[in-house]
Image: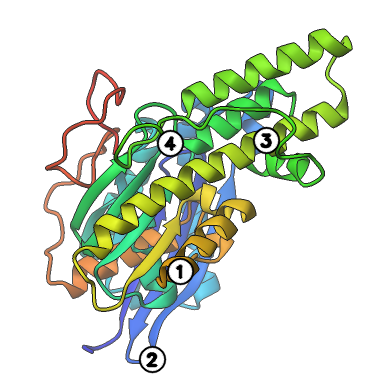
Amino acid sequence: MDRPLTILGIESSCDDSAAAVVRDGPAGARVLSSVVRGQNSLHAAFGGVVPEIAARAHAEVLDLCVEAALAEAGVSLADLDGIAVTAGPGLIGGVLAGVMTAKGLSAATGLPLWGVNHLAGHALTPRLTDDLPFPYLLLLASGGHCQFLLVKGPDRFRRLGGTIDDAPGEAFDKVAKLLGLPQPGGPAVEREAQTGDPRCIPLPRPLLDREGCDMSFSGLKTAALRARDKLMEGHGGLRESDRRDLCASFQTAVAEVLTEKARRALAIYLADEPATPSFAVAGGVAANRLIRDSLSSLCLREDVGFVAPPLALCTDNAAMIAWAGMERARAGLPPDPVITARPRWPLDTTASPLVGAGRKGAKS
């Protein structure tokens, strides 16, 4: 390996302001620091993320995050070899705040700057944590994205399938909201589901009757809403036991859909006979224990290695952005002469936009 490289990462694509320092050398990759400042308290009263509030908060704290990340890592700007920043996709105000912060630091220090696709940060995290060799199969599941990807290189991705409407994290958030649970919805639903009956309330498994790896979670969310209304009508309100059962039934439905679609994606991946077959999960939904366990059991049956990064690196963070910049630097990809904040930025630019991806084009 060449000399050690130290990269500062900056992330601000949604409602987490983050900065991190990652070093890669002969001893392997190390996360020297990872600072994340969430905004849950700012958005709690609105039942979801308000883009204008998020952008303003990013602008106020990103410099403090960078300062804290450098201090925690025990390095200065002079010790860095480069900067990587999320340039999209995401809420445009937040992405712009991060890009302008990174551009200012780059201009002041002369450090090279890489604009990173936020999804590539998630997709490459298994290489940071487990040194996973290319190619591997990845399920990227988060609040805004859900897709199966063949990861072949730092900038080489092939999409095998994705959600045609809501991402699973978005569906978790909406179900939590209709049940009166706090945001973010994923952890809240998972907590309620722990003592619920996952087979008590029949819910659909969307698109399992169709071939391929595409997914849909909008109808499942609507079915949960109708089940809630039926329970409330029958019992004169929503009992705590009903809420727990509905959460457990919904979570199980999501896990079974993801697992079956993963089985199909694995069949495509394994047909190419990779030397070291590996399946990884990334994104916030990968923190869900039932989903992790279901996918791990599938890989055990298929004799495929399973990698799930630590929970702190599943949700949005800047260490994954720094690492994605590191991968680009190691691959000899030059710094970006021009970086533009992008609300939409698909990883696989050759794939057709998914049905329901939006009038402005595919986010992922």
Earlier residue among tags 4 and 1: 4
Q: Position of residue 17 (x, y in %)?
A: 50, 47
10 Å neighbourhood of mark 3: few (<14), some, or many (≥20)? many
Q: Which residue is mark 1?
A: 306
10 Å neighbourhood of mark 1: few (<14), some, or many (≥20)? some
- Judge depth for marks 1 and 3 and give the one in front: 3
Does the CB distance between marks 4 and 3 fall below 8 Å?
no
**Residue ranking furthest to the front:** 209
- Judge depth for marks 2 and 1 and give the one in front: 1
| Quadrant where the image shows the N terminus | bottom left
Q: Which residue is mark 4?
A: 144
Q: Amino acid at mark 3?
A: Ser
Secondary structure of residue under mark 2: loop
Instruction: Locate residue 243: give its quadrant.
Output: top right
Residue 150 visible here: no
Earlier residue among tags 2 and 1: 2
- Residue in the image at 36% along x and 78% along y: 131
Q: Position of residue 139 (x, y in %)?
A: 39, 52
- Judge depth for marks 4 and 1 and give the one in front: 1
- Judge depth for marks 4 and 3 and give the one in front: 3
Q: Amino acid at mark 2?
A: Ala
- Judge depth for marks 2 and 4 and give the one in front: 4
Secondary structure of residue under mark 4: loop
Q: Position of residue 339 (x, y in %)?
A: 19, 46
Earlier residue among tags 3 and 2: 2
10 Å neighbourhood of mark 4: few (<14), some, or many (≥20)? many
Q: Position of residue 138 (x, y in %)?
A: 36, 57
- Residue in the image at 40% along x and 31% along y: 207
Q: Amino acid at mark 4?
A: Gly
Q: Which residue is mark 2?
A: 27
Dot label at residue 249: 3
